[in-house]
């Protein structure tokens, strides 16, 4: 589709959207002013509306397609969350409005803090991190602050399973730690002996996702927690897969000291084409003093902000204001609609859907990476057989699924399973949709056997065919520079 | 069961397929002693109607006071089309465009965003956004430290006239990487960073210099001199800019002889509602030669198998999902939906529309200043040119005055004494294009009322540095 | 089967070393390594004049989906780098042992050559990794 720049005509504007004339900026000396107009498109309001509406139709989305993207929890985003977070008073609220004019808003945040504490079993929650990765940073920074406050300076390593999200090691490095990888056992659980061999006085902590990124609940979690704590380290819980256990088992009860939650996953706030998210952090007693500010406290009948002055040991602020308020409001609305009855249903039906889908795919001849294990809210298939015998690999299957009107599952993650598909159906999908996915996979398998080039050349029905990533990286074209 | 579609018959059929007696059996690998009971502290589930009533009442409770605060979040008009389109399900409920062929809408839009940001800033390249302006500055500092290989000191000069929350956030994010942020004082009369104050660093190993335009006080900095100083001293320059202001102000790519190396800022003025401070989006632009040190998603234009133009994530080898512990940043997604809105906003306004709004903000803030001066004993603190914010001093401590005005449904400004103890009586005020003459009159009248009331109680002496007109 | 010239020495981490006979060596990545990485899109080289330790990270090669650190097979000072790769990283794919060389080292410890693998041993290692 043409770029908005290519539809641009000099002098055209959406005239309703700006003052009818340009005021004189006489108060600003010439040397501060720009002498050429910024290169932006010049289009009418209708042109802009039509262009972006048409662009939107080139996307797959939850509202339009099944989107079983493993580890991303692409479940239905209730529209009520959006409508209520966009009430005019919330949109107009300035972040620096005094607490006296913000009691309604602060009450929502306070309630959300309480709900998140209850569902995670942690002692304190700060809502301010703006994304899962920022929550990870905050969590590791708190671990660091804890050891430093105790004068325990020799702890320089963070342990990370080889199956972990790449953000885990990257966040720990931003906090000044060295990374020690630990291997995953053949059953999908952390290899306890491997863990024992790397634990020591240099261990600051371990970052775990449980259920893990290979889609199983680590049965040894109590042993792991005991071993790490005995070694003087702390346990970090990556909340990426919290959806699988919501209301069934709590990270705090497993022995974790700090957790981040991805509200855009478990609490169904929109992914928005890649953000905004929200990554609140929860902590056990020992990390309470270090939570990032600001937080909301209840004071008699009212609410107030807790800032650096109230929390002198805090790791401080990570956002110019108080985090992604609009995302927090959406999560709050969702949590209220779920209530205490709805929380465990999330885990139950996401597990039901995942286990059903796994069994049906296995029955259809697909190979599970961990066939001995229960699926949690997601599971892994490996297409190594297809890759070897048919030269049709996971990427080909993924691209062909698009032609069947299904967004591809996560591919080639986690790295330790060859030719893998990580599939997370979520609790909001109905049985027909899951059956439709199985039918599509079976059909693609048949195509791979009978007409492999059809699959290798997929997709065929999208607005573009497979894109040349190598050209994109070698001949960088990152911004429109004009015609010619 | 909200949002769960299963009928009882389907549940039974699915369990039979799985070979499980009941749903509980699916959790049999979790040690029994770890299981939690009912979440008593969470309230019972509510219907959409009940939640709407609760939330609407809370929103209503806070009302919509007349807003003269800026301080990094600005109350601008947003065309109705912006959020109507941005919240279409195809944008709202899509994820990061990993499957490029099924995400061309988001990808082309992000490419257009990158193009628009390079247009506004006059820089070579832009990423697809970061969390907010403050964390964008932190990422820019980390990027400069990586990119300036000739410098070994990891010392970055940060003006005290930069947004105090940005300084704190940058410090909190870089503190564990042995990076030293050193504060440059502001000039007491001008409120700007006096280029002379850099002379004490001449000849020293400085990794980067941060330059804000406008600065936190709304004051315009001598950006050309500062940028050239950085280049001459082997430091990279990092511009921190208001993107709306760039529709009229000289863009960072043109500062000094060769422009800045990196620029970043808060994208909120481009179509993002105030909404209590977030979600907003940070942006980051740089010279082409530094692109591999950039954090965050970057979209590239390429061709498909048939030679047709298409868009895809590129330079992914910088990122955490590939580079893991050696990534340029831990950042994963960006602020996609905010950028969607900002792109539509910029397309609707164009350069001329943005410039008209920026100019109106400038004139409105001057008009506000005139009205406030007329109150008496109220004057601007700094004598330098400014964009759309202004520091004014009151005859009394600001905090209580602001609280009283808030009770009058008026957010009269930002109390600077929180971050600048030397500015006890000073507030930062902003009048965007949305503030009407009636609102400004009402502000002046309310301020006069409150001051006269307080003047009878106490009168604080003004410090010398504050009187300069 | 990938190409493993017999006149070169190899590091376990898939770099090759060519002895220039004057106390310097030329270093690159093996044909096997470039095959595993796929189409290279960027090569980051060490700075001329920098001192490298055997086994230390000194360069990065990037394909679309992977980035791989290059470890210096020997210790010494970088006396030349293949700057042409900045514009044409695909040269490493096309000619890994020739025009796709990465950098040249002036050795500080000639004895380290004994630690390297010969073609046969390196071939056996690749064989073992594939199973």
Image: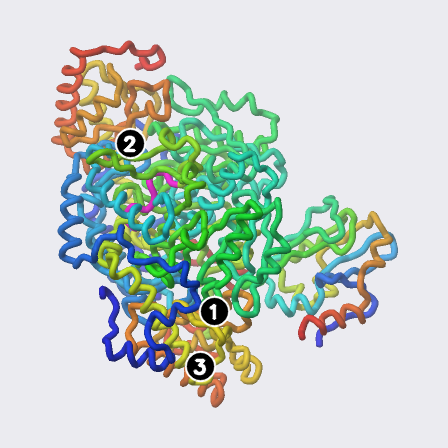
Kindly state the secondary structure of the residue where label 3 is placed.
helix
Task: Give the extent of the magenta segment.
Answer: A319-327
Numbered disc in front, either 1 or 3: 3
Residue B85, horizontal then vertical, whole percent? 25, 58
Q: Are marks 3 and 2 in contact (CB under 8 Å)?
A: no
Label 3 packing within 10 angstroms: few (<14), some (14-19), many (20+):
some
- Residue identified by numbered label 3: A362
In-image side of B460 versus A372 (left or right): left
**Foreground: A332 or A439?**
A332
Q: Is residue B254 visible?
A: yes
Q: How is the image coloured?
A: rainbow
- Residue identified by numbered label 2: B388
Relative to B259, say whether A199 is above or below: below
Label 2 packing within 10 angstroms: few (<14), some (14-19), many (20+):
many
Give the CA separation, mark 1 to mark 3: 18 Å
**Foreground: B41 or A109?**
B41
Chain to which the residue tagged by mark 3 belongs: A
**Foreground: C105 or A101?**
A101
Which part of the image, by quadrant, shows the C terminus of chain B?
A: top left
- Number of marks in the rendered image: 3
């Amino acid at each position: 589709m043409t770029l908005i720049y290519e539809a641009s005509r000099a002098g055209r504007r959406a005239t309703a959207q700006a003052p009818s004339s340009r005021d004189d900026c006489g108060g600003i000396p010439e040397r501060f002013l720009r002498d050429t107009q910024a290169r932006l498109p010049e289009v009418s309001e209708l042109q802009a509306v039509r262009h972006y509406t048409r662009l939107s139709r080139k996307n797959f989305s939850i509202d339009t397609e099944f989107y079983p993207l493993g580890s991303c929890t692409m479940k239905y985003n209730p529209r009520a969350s959006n409508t209520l977070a966009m009430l005019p008073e919330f949109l107009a609220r300035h972040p620096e409005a005094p607490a006296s004019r913000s009691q309604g808003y602060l009450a929502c945040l306070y309630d959300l803090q309480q709900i998140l504490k209850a569902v995670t079993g942690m002692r304190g929650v700060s809502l301010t991190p703006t994304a899962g990765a920022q929550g990870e940073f905050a969590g590791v920074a708190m671990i660091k602050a804890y050891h430093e406050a105790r004068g325990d300076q020799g702890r320089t390593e963070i342990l990370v399973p080889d199956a972990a999200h790449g953000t885990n090691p990257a966040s720990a490095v931003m906090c000044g730690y060295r990374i020690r990888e630990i291997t995953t056992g053949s059953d999908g659980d952390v290899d306890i002996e491997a863990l024992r061999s790397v634990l020591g006085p240099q261990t600051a902590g371990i970052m775990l996702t449980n259920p893990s990124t290979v889609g199983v609940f680590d049965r040894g979690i109590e042993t792991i927690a005991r071993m790490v704590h005995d070694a003087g380290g702390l346990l970090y819980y990556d909340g990426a897969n919290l959806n699988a256990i919501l209301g069934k088992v709590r990270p705090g009860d497993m022995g974790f000291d700090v957790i981040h939650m991805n509200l855009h996953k478990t609490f169904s706030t929109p992914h928005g084409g890649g953000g905004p998210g929200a990554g609140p952090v929860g902590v056990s007693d020992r990390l309470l003093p270090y939570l990032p500010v600001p937080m909301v406290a209840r004071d008699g009948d009212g609410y107030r902000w807790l800032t650096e002055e109230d929390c002198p040991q805090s790791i401080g602020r990570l956002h110019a204001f108080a985090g992604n308020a609009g995302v927090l409001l959406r999560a709050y609305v969702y949590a209220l609609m779920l209530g205490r009855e709805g929380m465990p249903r999330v885990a139950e039906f996401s597990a039901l859907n995942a286990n059903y889908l796994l069994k049906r795919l296995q029955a259809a001849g697909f190979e599970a990476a961990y066939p001995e294990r229960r699926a949690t809210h997601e599971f892994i298939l490996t297409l190594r057989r297809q890759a070897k015998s048919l030269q049709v690999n996971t990427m080909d299957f993924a691209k062909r699924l698009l032609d069947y009107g299904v967004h591809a599952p996560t591919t080639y993650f986690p790295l330790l399973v060859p030719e893998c598909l990580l599939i997370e159906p979520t609790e909001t999908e109905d049985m027909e949709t899951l059956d439709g996915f199985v039918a599509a996979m079976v059909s693609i398998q048949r195509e791979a056997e009978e007409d492999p080039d059809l699959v290798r050349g997929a997709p065929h029905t999208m607005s573009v065919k497979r894109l040349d990533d190598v050209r994109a990286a070698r001949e960088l074209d990152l911004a429109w520079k004009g015609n010619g | 069961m909200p949002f769960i579609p299963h009928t009882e018959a389907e549940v039974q059929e699915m369990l039979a397929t799985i070979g499980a007696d009941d749903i509980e059996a699916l959790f049999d690998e979790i040690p029994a002693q770890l299981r939690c009971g009912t979440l008593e502290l969470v309230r019972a589930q509510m219907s959409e109607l009940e939640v709407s009533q609760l939330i609407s009442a809370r929103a209503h409770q806070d009302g919509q006071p007349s807003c003269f605060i800026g301080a990094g979040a600005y109350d601008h008009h947003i065309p109705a089309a912006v959020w109507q389109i941005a919240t279409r399900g195809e944008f709202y409920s899509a994820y990061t465009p990993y499957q490029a062929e099924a995400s061309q809408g988001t990808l082309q839009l992000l490419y257009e965003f990158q193009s628009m940001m390079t247009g506004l800033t006059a820089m070579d390249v832009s990423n697809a956004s970061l969390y907010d302006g403050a964390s964008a500055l932190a990422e820019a500092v980390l990027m400069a430290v990586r990119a300036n290989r000739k410098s070994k000191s990891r010392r970055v000069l940060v003006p005290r006239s930069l947004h105090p929350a940005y300084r704190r956030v940058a410090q909190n994010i870089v503190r564990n990487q042995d990076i030293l942020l050193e504060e440059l004082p502001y000039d007491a009369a001008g409120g700007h960073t006096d280029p002379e104050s850099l002379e004490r660093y001449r000849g020293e190993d400085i990794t980067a210099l941060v330059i804000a335009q406008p600065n936190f006080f709304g004051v315009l900095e001598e950006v050309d001199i500062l940028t050239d100083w950085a280049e001459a001293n082997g430091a990279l320059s990092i511009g921190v800019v208001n993107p709306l202001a760039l529709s009229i102000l000289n863009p960072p790519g043109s500062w000094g002889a060769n422009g800045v190396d990196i620029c970043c800022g808060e994208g909120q003025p481009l179509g993002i509602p105030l909404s209590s401070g977030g979600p907003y989006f940070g942006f980051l632009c740089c010279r082409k030669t530094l692109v591999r040190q950039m954090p965050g998603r970057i979209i590239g234009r390429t061709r498909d198998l048939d030679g047709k133009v298409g868009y895809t994530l590129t330079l992914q080898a910088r990122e955490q999902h590939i580079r893991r512990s050696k990534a340029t940043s831990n950042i994963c997604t960006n602020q996609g939906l905010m950028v969607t809105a900002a792109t539509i906003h910029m397309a609707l306004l164009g350069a001329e529309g943005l410039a008209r709004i920026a100019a109106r903000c400038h004139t409105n803030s001057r008009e506000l200043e005139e009205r406030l001066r007329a109150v008496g004993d109220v004057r601007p603190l700094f004598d330098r040119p400014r964009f759309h914010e202004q520091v004014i001093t009151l005859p009394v401590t600001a905090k209580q005055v602001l609280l009283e005005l808030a009770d009058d449904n008026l957010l009269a400004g930002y109390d600077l004494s929180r971050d600048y103890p030397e500015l006890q009586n000073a507030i930062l005020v902003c009048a965007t294009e949305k503030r009407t003459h009636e609102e400004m009159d009402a502000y002046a009248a309310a301020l006069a009322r409150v001051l006269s009331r307080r003047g009878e109680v106490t009168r604080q002496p003004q410090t010398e540095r504050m009187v300069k007109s | 089967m990938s190409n493993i010239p017999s006149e070169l020495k190899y590091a376990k981490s898939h770099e090759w070393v060519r002895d220039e006979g004057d106390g310097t060596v030329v270093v690159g990545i093996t044909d096997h390594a470039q095959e595993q990485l796929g189409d290279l899109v960027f090569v980051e080289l060490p700075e001329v004049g920098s001192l490298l330790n055997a086994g230390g990270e000194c360069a990065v090669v990037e394909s679309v989906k992977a980035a791989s650190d290059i470890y210096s097979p020997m210790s010494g000072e970088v006396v030349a780098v293949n700057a042409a790769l900045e514009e044409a990283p695909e040269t490493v794919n096309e000619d890994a042992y020739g025009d796709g060389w990465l950098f040249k080292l002036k050795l500080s410890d000639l004895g380290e050559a004994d630690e390297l693998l010969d073609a046969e041993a390196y071939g056996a290692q690749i064989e073992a990794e594939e199973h």
